[in-house]
Image (cartoon, rainbow, N blue to C red):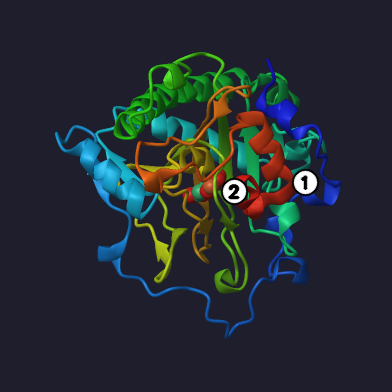
């Protein structure tokens, strides 16, 4: 069975697109990381009332509210999600412990040019002319192979905490995915993979160092996720979601919520009725920011075919593709990928 790592093998990156700069020794923004000039107007105004909805998973109307959020935003914040606070905080503390290490130590676990797991720049970096104020660490399956290189004698704590975090995220992701599939009337046959052990999951730890001139650079550049759903934890502001006609809308993290985004695979499966939102991360002068994203997708050989109802209007918008094929298209064509499979 192919894995997520196999899907990336055909598109190796340059080392320059993998190695982050040493942010601790960058008192100013270097030209390589300058996205905007001081007077550029690129941040939208902030109206907290018109951001993504906060939905209580135990609300009897949760399914309907999720349906509306998926149509309007492709994202929502979820409370009463069942993941203990200790698990969330424990994972964030381990992410912080890892990213606080000296650069030489983190570079021991640098991602290989054709690999998907390990330490490095965001995988979307080659599609942008400028670097991002960000470091990432990707875990696919067990973290121990990479973490042993960083902490030869002390990797068990990190690995155990991340493994437990992933297990709990999987249960939540399955629950939310089943709700989405109920809403879309997806058949038993097409949802058999939910709950299986060979799903295409990945855990992405993100670190955004504090930044001397936050308005001139970028934390994470605009992108859509490839997953069916992504569950993100972060207690800090910075995430923004693009809303057609309104611009970039900040997400104000609810202290007890996790953020759920739909990815391109959900957009394809729903035949475009649910959207995979463009999102980005901005920076802060005073605070560092951490986030952990759990990507949940079907197995690589699963065929995605858009849901088509009996309506004349609902002819399939996308040709059928396997998950692996779509990930390979995205690794090469990034933001144009959906249009490349459009019928
Ligand atoms: O840091 C965040 O809040 C979002 C991270 C994200 O979008 C990603 O890892 O794909
Ligand atoms: Fe994302």
Q: Which mark is residue 207?
A: none
The secondary structure type at the circle numbered 1 is: loop
Q: Which residue is drawn at 57% across and 30% down?
A: 202
Label 1 beta carbon less than 8 Å to ligand 1? no
Count of labels in the image: 2
Q: Earlier in the sequence, mark 1 or mark 2?
A: 1
For disc 2, the marked residue is 338
Q: Which residue is drawn at 38% across and 27% down?
A: 186
Q: How crowded is mark 2: few (under 14 residues within 10 Å), some or many (20 or more)?
A: some
Check the image and report above or below for 113 versus 47. Answer: above
For disc 1, the marked residue is 18
Residue 37 rendering spot, x and y as whole percentages: 64, 81
Residue 315 rendering spot, x and y as whole percentages: 46, 43
Residue 221 visible in this rendered orientation of the protein: yes
Select label 1 or label 2 by which is in front. 2
The secondary structure type at the circle numbered 2 is: helix
Residue 194 visible in this rendered orientation of the protein: no
Q: Which residue is drawn at 77% across and 39% down?
A: 107
């Amino acid at each position: 069975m192919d894995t997520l790592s196999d899907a990336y093998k055909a598109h190796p990156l340059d080392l320059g697109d993998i190695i982050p700069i040493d942010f601790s020794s960058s008192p100013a923004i270097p030209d390589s990381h300058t996205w905007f000039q001081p007077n550029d107007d690129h941040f939208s105004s902030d109206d907290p009332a018109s951001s993504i909805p906060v939905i209580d998973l135990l609300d009897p109307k949760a399914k309907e509210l999720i349906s509306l959020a998926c149509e309007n935003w492709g994202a929502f914040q979820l409370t009463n999600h069942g993941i203990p606070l200790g698990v969330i905080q424990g994972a964030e503390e381990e992410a912080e412990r890892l990213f606080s290490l000296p650069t030489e130590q983190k570079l021991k676990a640098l991602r290989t040019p054709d690999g998907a797991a390990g330490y490095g720049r965001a995988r979307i970096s080659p599609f942008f002319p400028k670097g991002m104020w960000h470091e990432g660490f990707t875990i696919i399956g067990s973290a121990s192979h990479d973490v042993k290189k960083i902490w030869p004698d002390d990797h068990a704590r990190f690995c155990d905490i991340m493994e437990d975090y992933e297990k709990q995220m999987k249960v939540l992701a399955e629950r939310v995915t089943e709700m989405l599939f109920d809403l879309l009337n997806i058949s038993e046959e097409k949802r058999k993979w939910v709950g299986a052990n060979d799903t295409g999951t990945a855990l992405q730890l993100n670190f955004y160092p504090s930044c001397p001139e936050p308005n001139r650079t970028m934390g994470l550049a605009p992108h859509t996720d490839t997953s069916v759903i992504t569950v993100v934890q972060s207690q800090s502001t910075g995430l923004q979601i693009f809303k057609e006609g309104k611009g970039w809308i900040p997400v104000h993290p609810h202290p007890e919520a996790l953020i759920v985004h739909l990815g391109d695979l959900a957009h394809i499966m729903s035949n475009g009725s649910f959207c995979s939102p463009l999102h980005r991360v901005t920076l802060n002068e005073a605070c560092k920011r951490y986030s952990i994203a759990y990507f949940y997708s079907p197995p690589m050989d699963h065929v995605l075919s858009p849901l088509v109802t009996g309506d004349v209007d609902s002819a399939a918008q996308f040709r059928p593709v396997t998950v692996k094929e779509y990930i390979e298209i995205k690794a090469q064509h990034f933001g144009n990928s959906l249009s490349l499979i459009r019928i």
